[in-house]
Image (tube, rainbow, N blue to C red):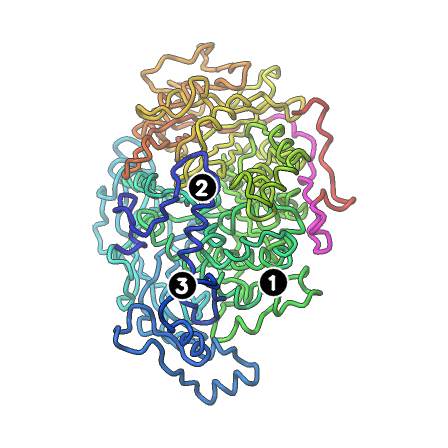
Amino acid sequence: MDPHEAQGNAPRDENRNPHASGSQWRHQESRAFAKYEAERAQPQQPSRHHHHHSIAREADAREGNVNDLADFLNKSRISPEEAGTRPPSDPKFKPVVLGATEAREVLNGEKSMADALAPERVPNDKEIAVGPLINYRRMEGSHWVGSVLVVTRGGGREQTFRPSLFLRKAAMVGVSNVHANGHANGNGAAANGHSSNEPKVSESQAICLYSDWRNTFWRFDVHLEMEPYETKWEYWLSDYLVFASKTKPKVNSFFVPAITESMRIMFHSCNGFSVGTDEEDWSGPCLWNDVMRRHQEAPFHVMIGGGDQIYNDGIRVSGPLRRWTSISNPKKRRHYPFPESLRAECDDYYLNNYIRWYGTEPFAAANGQIPQLNIWDDHDIIDGFGSYVDDFMRCDVFRGIGGIAHKYYMLFQHHLPPPASTYTSDTMPKTEKEAGQGIDPNQMIAAYVHPAMTESNYIVGPSPGPYVSEHSHNMFTQLGARIAFLGIDARTERTRHQVNYTETYEAIFSRLRQELSHAIQIEKPYKHLILLLGIPIAYPRLTWLENIFASPLMGPLKLLNKRVGFGGSFFNSFDGSVDLLDDLDDHYTARTHKRERNGLILKLQQIAAEFSVRVTILGGDVHLAALGRFYSNPKLNIPLEEDYRYIVNVVSSAIVNKPPPAAVANLLARRNRIHHLDHDTDETLLKMFDKDPGDSVKTAKHNKVTMPSRNFAVITENSPNNGAHGHGHDQNGNGNGNGFHASSSPPPNSTPGGTFPGHKDGRYALGKGEVNAGTKHKAADPAEHGTGSDGSLDVCIRIEIDQHNPEGRTEGYGLTIPALSYKGPRPPTIAPPPGSAGSSGSHGSGGTGRSDVPDVPEIPAGVR
């Protein structure tokens, strides 16, 4: 079976690394795993456009033939056939014929030998290597705007064809249900209510984003009119395009909500396996089977990726960075060059890994049917990128792979043209290294790059990042009628001491204020703002562990690791620090990010109060599920419905990667304290996990706040258009309440009027929506989820029951986030969070930036 089509229940791969581990304790691959991968990588054939450095054999080795010598003597004047296409009796090599024109271009420096010898176009240039991948971009009035990406084989500077995408309306979903029970967004498959007229077919011609001799990236723009009812749309591609996958459907479909409704949201993160993981022991990416089951029951309108949509860490173990990571001397590793030959190898790795992973089922099926919104995180580049020490992050190799990862992040995840060139140490003058990438003529030979695109859904950072010499791409868009979405790119500008530049925060909050104000002016105000961050922001502190890992006491252990390998994979392969330290430094709760984090929360509180919009934060990265909240000090006696400080952090991670051991999750639960952001704002995790999923045992009895099991989240608005037929309480708080089943008893301490004062301990229910949080909550029941009518959000985190079940069965844990109704005075104006300045000359400081950067108010003493 093709690896692109491998399911979670595929037969055991005979070529798998026998040292792969299913242990939840192993964060990094073992030395045995890395050694096996290195040995397996040795006989690899050279790439078409560069030479591999040969690996010396042992001095006393006897091979018994002279083929290696012959191959060596011939390699500069003859080229190998494609593996597997040459009959055994044919000679291994054939003469290379170089035309006079190409030879002259090589001699004049206009072309490299590799580009001159590259095939002009392979015959199967109309074969789809991967795709379609559908993205949601924005709403323009009553129009839904998205894009579809397909990647075909072959290409070059000019394209000989231009494919088309065809689109038609397939069905109105739940039309009869709307009249029958008042549910505006439907809750079933598209069998309900087909249009009586033959649907009109529209055509969208492709835009070539990027093309070289290997692949061509085609983008199709999709603009469609939203309807009074939820609608199913179908699309297909030009008939002459052929799918490489035998299981790909010719026609794909997606769903768009009614014009008066908000989108049904699916959220995920950490969509891949760490190097060294026994993927078969974890049934592969099997939770995507459950995602598609839920999509069949109640279609998702958007799929939000919170970072690590792909894991590219293998580049340092079985890829072209293997030799670099094996260098034991940190100084030599830091000064290792990143020439064009290594850049080309790394470019091949990232491209092929994207094609492999985005073609892997059942993830591939979701890519073509659920429109995506994505931000990236470190594994989209390489583990820990941005969180190592500054001088190491500035080395040529890290700058090089950062640029390549950004290139394919733009193409695959945003459907945007990449920069014309990525970093190499060959062509970039030192005076330009801090100012930006520039154009490398070698990379433009026989390649086409579309001019940069500007779209209104992006908030582009004013200054390039310190290690990726490109601008951050933050997003603002509308998720249907009453939900705004803000995604912050928390990786492009990241250093060990900052997440984003101050001027980037200024641009983000300026745009956010404009959008929220405009919505009020046209009398279509947003009721919810969903903020996407790559990492949790309301999470237990591990400062004591940071202090141990960063203390001088670790010095002797690091020396022993360097000299004799003591501690194995406890230390990372890059800067020699404790491997988990980069993960701890990544968190907003790390001491290095504390000031920036506090400023961000205070700014969000100000936005919530000014526009009476409920802020909810999505975060991943930590490989477990949790539910953090900021809220007003209980002494203030503010109901959650009126509390602008109440901000929920939905932590959902990972959908594919293995979770940490139960002992780690239990330790985090023990560290779950009530922290004080300031005198008026508290923070802690909610005791949400009333039981382990199914009949499994995953946590200690005391742990009700962290769940070490793979998961994803579902978020649905309790639409006010559900009216009297909704199962929850109405806008006035009447009815059964939104936090529990109609059959459940009322919450303790509730009054006849329906108000709920909340618990004085924030680890318990603070309002009606948190009562019975967990498996007994109505948001956890697919039949009840999103059927209320008070404008709140139902949140369900779906937790994997058994890692060995390839069907990926899950159990739901729910709560309800109330809409905000705040009419009090505005809180004091808060300056943007204090990241560092974004000018190129200040990137390396990693500190808090220039002295003229506006500061946030001092956090009172006693803040933890």
Label 2 SS: loop
Query: Residue reaching furthest bottom?
Result: 100
Query: Mark 3 is on which residue type?
Result: Gln
Disc 2 from disc 1: Cα separation: 33 Å
Examine the residues drawn in magenta and state their main secondary structure: loop
The residue at which mark 2 appears reads as 269
Query: Which sits earlier in the primary sequence, circle 1 or circle 3?
Result: 3
Q: Is residue 354 above or below residue 259?
A: below
Neighbour tally class for label 3: few under 14, some 14-19, many 20 plus, Cα within 10 Å: few
- Find residue 480 and report its horizontal and vertical position in percent: 43, 42
Disc 1 from disc 3: Cα separation: 22 Å
Residue 844 in magenta?
A: yes
- Find residue 315 and report its horizontal and vertical position in percent: 47, 54
Q: Quadrant of residue 562?
A: top right
Q: Compare residues 205 and 538 and report the one nearer the observer.
A: 538
Query: Mark 1 is on which residue type?
Result: Pro
Numbered tag placed on residue 44 in the rendering: 3
The residue at which mark 1 appears reads as 337
Disc 2 from disc 3: Cα separation: 33 Å
Q: Quadrant of the N terminus?
A: bottom left
Q: Is residue 530 above or below residue 704?
A: below
Query: Mark 2 is on which residue type?
Result: Ser
Q: Can see residue 485?
A: yes
Q: Compare residues 508 and 12 and report the one nearer the observer.
A: 12
Residue 21 in magenta?
A: no
